[in-house]
Image (spheres, rainbow, N blue to C red):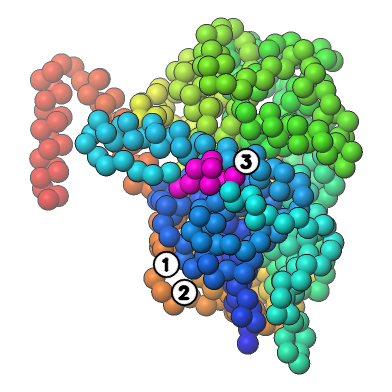
Amino acid sequence: MPVRMHVLGAAHVVTGSSYLLEANGRRILVDCGMFQGSKTLKELNYRPFPYEPDRLHAVLLTHAHIDHSGLLPKLTKAGFHGPIHATRSTIELCAIMLPDSGHIQEMEVEQLNRRRSRGGEPPVEPIYTAEDAVACMTQFRPVDYGAWLDLGDGARARWWNAGHILGSASIEIEVAEAGGEPVRILMSGDLGPEAKLFHPDPDGPQGLDLVVCEATYGDRDRPDTTIADRRTLLASEIRAAAQRGGPLLVPCFAVERTQEILTDLIDLMEAGTIPRAPVFVDSPLAIKATEVFRSHAGELEEGGALARLTNSPFVRFTESADQSKSLARFRGFHIIIAASGMAEAGRIRHHLKNHLWRSSTTVLFVGYQAEGTLGRILLDGAPTVTIHGDAVRVKAQIRSIDSYSGHADRTEVLDWLKARLPIRGGVALVHAEERAIAAFVPVVGAEVVTPERVVAPHLDDVLEIAPGSVRLVLPATPRRIEPERAKGQDWHNDSAAFLLDLKDTLDKAADDRARGVILRRLKKALEEIE
């Protein structure tokens, strides 16, 4: 009987990674990530799981990022009582990231419910709380790279370094068939690039039936770069921001990206390459993550640099909400690094709300911005955005540096796939937006396996894997959302943009009479639709 894999996330999008394997009576979940981006996608986080949590036998976790681990507390709250297997470093990071995620949800739901109360709407509940996340941590079990873990009934798994963040892994899964050869599957997780400060290049096994591979940058290569090149780019952006005279806001992933940016900033300031200025790390999670990194400094490439992060005279850590709010009083050039990296939640949204309308402000993105996120909307040049229910004009300079990305680019992923040959069955491309998938499918079909053995499953598709073969099966039940609704911005984004455009039009109208004409025409158009 073939192994079945249900693709439950990161299908033609880059968030919500989750895959359910059914083999020999075992039900094993690989990752349980949170959806980010458009409201249509994020609404999936609130729905029941498309399987029965109490029937799962185990969870295998590739790494700690919230788009891979963020719904684990919801899973355990919903009745899953089995083990969650992950590397020790991933467990340490989850121990701070998941409670932080719960806390953010509690705070944001509290703010949302205040607005709903004013509108006469009923309150909503957070997906889970910080307390739920702490309870979830009791189910984590550590694994070592390269060591086989027996999952029962002929299934086993082992973790390989993925070079993405501390503790990140690709997971090899082997399912023994009675009287036949085993089925071998490799889940890439997120693969790191060559120019990473702390990690070696990703690794993995060979001779597989299926490789489920991320394709985040499947449509492009980054220019060949070194850490020195990256610092040169950063220095140029910082000097330009200093000349504008206002704050430099860096929406930044708290785990690893913040530590890399800090290391580069300290080196550049000490060398006199950029102006010396206060650097505020406004993220309790980043502060805790930095301590985790320091405790593993001996295991990391360039780990010695971590000791300087908390001792530098240029760096100031703000932990409390009051300390964070006090940053609004600063004037002149200074740097604020705050989560989240896609500006979807956390303290960075407050800083953006305070400063986006100033032409002296610079916003520097240093990571991938998924479709529908505030970060992507800003990068795409929106003149106005909505933050915490308020419209904010965008007069700040919006900049980005791609060389800090934690993901391998097209050529790096392609090289990693070729190193996994022979691949007897096929390659499934996931964790990428439509444009990247469309560009990468023919490349993999030409250079890794034959074209008919490359699949790009949509949400809730099923893969059937047998020795030497992979078959894509459409879901037996209706999909949670149709493929076209999972992509890009949704009607919520369109609605917000329309309301902002309407306000602009009314503000620019010659007088109240002209505004009345606009509103009457709009009302008539709405009546005709009805």
Disc 2 from disc 1: Cα separation: 7 Å
Q: Secondary structure at mark 1?
A: loop
Q: Residues within 10 Å of mark 1 (few under 14, many from 20)?
A: some
Majority secondary structure of magenta residues? helix
Q: Where is mark 1, residue-wise?
A: 479
Rendered residue at 62%/10% (across/down): 333
Q: Which mark is residue 97?
A: 3
Q: Residues within 10 Å of mark 3 (few under 14, many from 20)?
A: many
> Are discs 2 and 3 less than 8 Å apart at CB?
no
Amino acid at pointer 2: Pro
Disc 2 from disc 3: Cα separation: 33 Å
Q: Where is mark 2, residue-wise?
A: 475
Between 156 and 218, which is closer to the camera in this rendering?
156
> Are discs 2 and 1 less than 8 Å apart at CB?
yes
Magenta residues, start to end: 127-134
Q: Indicate left or right for 529 with 477 as reference.
A: left
Q: For marks 1 and 3, give the one nearer the viewer.
A: 3
